[in-house]
Amino acid sequence: MDAAKKPVTVIINGRRCRADAGERILSVAIREKIAIPHLCYEASLDPYGACRLCLVEVIKRGKNEMTTSCTLWATEGLDVVTDTPDIVKHRNILFELYLAQAPKSEIIKKMAAQYGVTKTRFFKKVNPADPLGNACILCGLCVRVCDEIMGAGAITFVNRGPYTVVNTPFSEVTRDCLGCGACAKVCPTGAIRIDDLEGERVMTSWSGTRVPLVQCRACGRFFAPQALAAKTLARLTPALAGDVAALCPECRGQQIAEREIRAKTGGAGNHA
């Protein structure tokens, strides 16, 4: 058996839970439906504890140590608590900071309210021209998924200190964007805006970058960004790539079904 997959027992809030050795405690808690708030955790990326909301206390040798559960590995007998007075205090301060940093994020407001935080003592700076709608918390998930998973590197952190934002380099239209929308998919606060217009995907939050869309040759519907389609098709065999290059998923499925019918009926289609 792989040592990394060795079953272990961890204790969360006094409850014994099964886990794999090396599994992150936040992952265990999510599976066991134990509530731990979090914003920057994404299963497809290595966790790095940016948002700090998933703090837990680890009981070691009679002493309590606070750490992020998304970076804490499961080991046999690990004992953690998720709602001590110190954690609640730190968590509430973090929620207040996020309410100030992302005052327009309804997701942040709702999450904070669930934990009893409905207002902030910190100054709310609202920029009417913010391309991320004053809802970004700078967790970096969008930057990481664009770089580490999609391999595009179309967006990055711009400026420094309190002026840091996420955007395209130099806040200009970029040719590197695939238009895949992975950034919006992983954004925990709903800050990223993407609009599909006739024949184009407009990355509104990313300096208005426009990515042409592929048009289905069968039904005429625009269904995929050309840049992403080209990257995907390059990994397929030429025969398969030619088969799917200009068909939307619905028409492609219909084509496959028709082929199966013809194969089973000796070439005779359904003409009823």
Image (tube, rainbow, N blue to C red):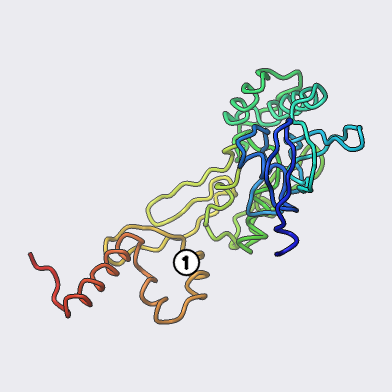
The N terminus, quarter of image: bottom right
Comparing 97 with 227, the one in front is 97
| Residue drawn at point x = 74 percent, y = 37 percent | 11
Q: Which quarter of the figure has residue 105?
A: top right
| Total residue callouts | 1
Provide residue 179's location: percent of width, then percent of height. 52, 57
Provide residue 83's location: percent of width, then percent of height. 75, 26
Provide residue 47's location: percent of width, then percent of height. 72, 49
Comparing 115 with 217, the one in front is 115
Residue at the far left: name it.
272
Callout 1: few (<14), some (14-19), or many (20+) C-alpha neighbours within 10 Å?
many
| Residue drawn at point x = 74 percent, y = 38 percent | 51
- Mark 1, secondary structure of its residue: helix
Comparing 8 with 244, the one in front is 8
Indicate left or right for 229 with 10 as reference: left
Indicate left or right for 69 with 261 as reference: right
| Residue drawn at point x = 46 percent, y = 80 percent | 237
Q: Is the residue 231 above or below the residue 177 in the image?
A: below
Comparing 37 with 142, the one in front is 37
Q: Which residue is mark 1?
A: 229
The three-letter code of the residue at mark 1 reads Ala
Q: Is the residue 242 above or below the residue 94 in the image?
A: below
Indicate left or right for 19 with 209 as reference: right
Provide residue 206's location: percent of width, then percent of height. 59, 49
The C terminus, quarter of image: bottom left
| Residue drawn at point x = 43 percent, y = 55 percent | 200
